[in-house]
Image (tube, helix red, strand yellow):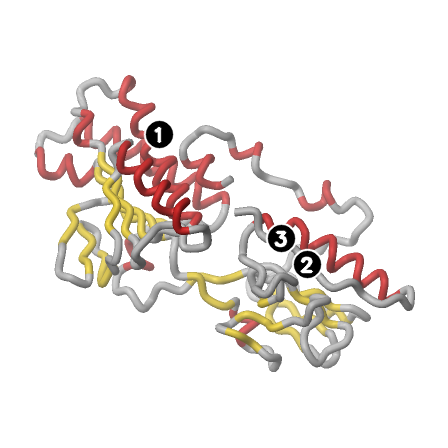
């Protein structure tokens, strides 16, 4: 729901779940994980800039670390782009859009004003498409408060490296989404890869230069740094589990979510979406409880609904 926060269709407090409120019967410790010893099921914490916590050892260890972000391969992306990974990013992006509108109102230079009002979203997956659509909605909704701006100057461009949007979905849905966005005035660039980003423009691999002061990055998912250091079987930086969500080769270590590569029970693997996450969590909990009680765990099975 982060894109809806960007577009102001939802307020931040509508999309957050305070973890201590949710987990009333758990001990919650907020800390940065420094390392995990899989064999001993031991978690060590980062002591930088705060109190040093004692390591924790457990009978059962669950790894649900998600993914990290690494865009160093694209020059300038880390320095000049806005990211969409958490609530703080969404709020920063919403504030950034409003600031750009305010700047554009008093900017006499036509070329610079166009760059201030041009938003380029990199990535045509779930996050990219939703974020680009919400930015477009917010710009359109804001026009009545900025009457001096020419509506044609409000522009959103979506850049995607593949031949269709939303590759996780059926091709027909991806094509439908593209037609819908273009009908609303968005420019969609397919088979386009960003080669560099600066404070003034985005350059594509084919040499195209897009003048903009606003680049939003929704790509660049990378394995979590702790996951990379683990001596377990991995597939493209994700921990491989069996059908019961156990880490292969480790009886009491479990993994699920974006950091794991788990079979979906239907011939594929679980997609990194909430549709799977809301089912993986309870299944992992039930399986751990079953093992503790001496019962066999139940294989995970779920077919995506699109």
Q: Position of residue 15 (x, y in %)?
A: 57, 37
> Which residue is rendered at x = 60% and y = 82% of the image?
231
Q: Which residue is nearer to you in this view: 44 or 59? A: 59
Q: How many marks?
A: 3
Badge 1 marks a residue whose secondary structure is: helix
Q: Is residue 36 above or below residue 273?
A: below
Crowding at mark 3 (Cα within 10 Å: few <14, some 14-19, many 20+): some
Q: Which residue is mark 3?
A: 277
Crowding at mark 1 (Cα within 10 Å: few <14, some 14-19, many 20+): some
Mark seen at residue 138: 1
- Tell me the CA gap for discs 1 and 3: 29 Å
Q: Position of residue 133 (x, y in %)?
A: 36, 37
Q: Nearer the viewer, mark 2 or mark 1?
A: 2
Mark seen at residue 301: 2
Crowding at mark 2 (Cα within 10 Å: few <14, some 14-19, many 20+): some
Q: Nearer the viewer, mark 2 or mark 3?
A: 2
Taking the image as shown, residue 135 lies to the left or right of residue 270, namely: left
């Amino acid at each position: 729901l982060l894109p809806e926060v960007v577009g102001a269709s939802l307020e931040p407090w509508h999309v957050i779940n305070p973890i201590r409120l949710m987990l009333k019967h758990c001990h919650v410790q907020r800390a940065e994980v420094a390392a995990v010893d899989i064999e001993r099921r031991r978690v060590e914490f980062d002591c930088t800039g705060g109190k040093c916590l004692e390591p924790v050892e457990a009978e059962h260890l669950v790894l649900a670390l998600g993914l990290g972000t690494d865009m160093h391969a694209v020059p300038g992306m880390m320095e000049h782009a806005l990211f969409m990974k958490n609530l703080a990013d969404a709020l920063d992006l919403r504030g950034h859009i409003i600031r750009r509108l305010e700047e554009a109102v008093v900017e006499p230079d036509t070329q610079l004003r166009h760059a201030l009002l041009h938003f380029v979203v990199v990535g045509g997956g779930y996050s990219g498409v939703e974020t680009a659509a919400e930015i477009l909605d917010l710009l359109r909704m804001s026009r009545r408060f900025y009457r001096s701006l020419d509506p044609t100057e409000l522009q959103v461009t979506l850049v995607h490296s593949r031949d269709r949007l939303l590759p996780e979905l059926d091709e027909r849905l991806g094509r439908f989404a593209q037609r819908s966005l273009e009908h609303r005035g968005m420019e969609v660039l397919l088979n386009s890869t960003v080669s560099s980003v600066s404070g003034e423009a985005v350059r594509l691999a084919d040499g195209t230069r897009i003048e903009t002061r606003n680049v939003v990055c929704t790509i660049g998912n990378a394995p979590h740094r702790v996951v990379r250091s683990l001596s377990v079987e991995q597939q493209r930086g994700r921990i491989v589990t069996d059908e019961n969500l156990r880490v292969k080769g480790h009886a009491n270590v479990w993994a699920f979510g974006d950091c794991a590569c788990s079979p979906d029970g239907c011939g594929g693997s679980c997609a990194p979406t909430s549709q799977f996450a809301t089912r993986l969590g309870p299944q992992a909990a039930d399986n751990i409880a079953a093992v503790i009680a001496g019962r066999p765990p139940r294989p995970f099975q779920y077919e995506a609904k699109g």
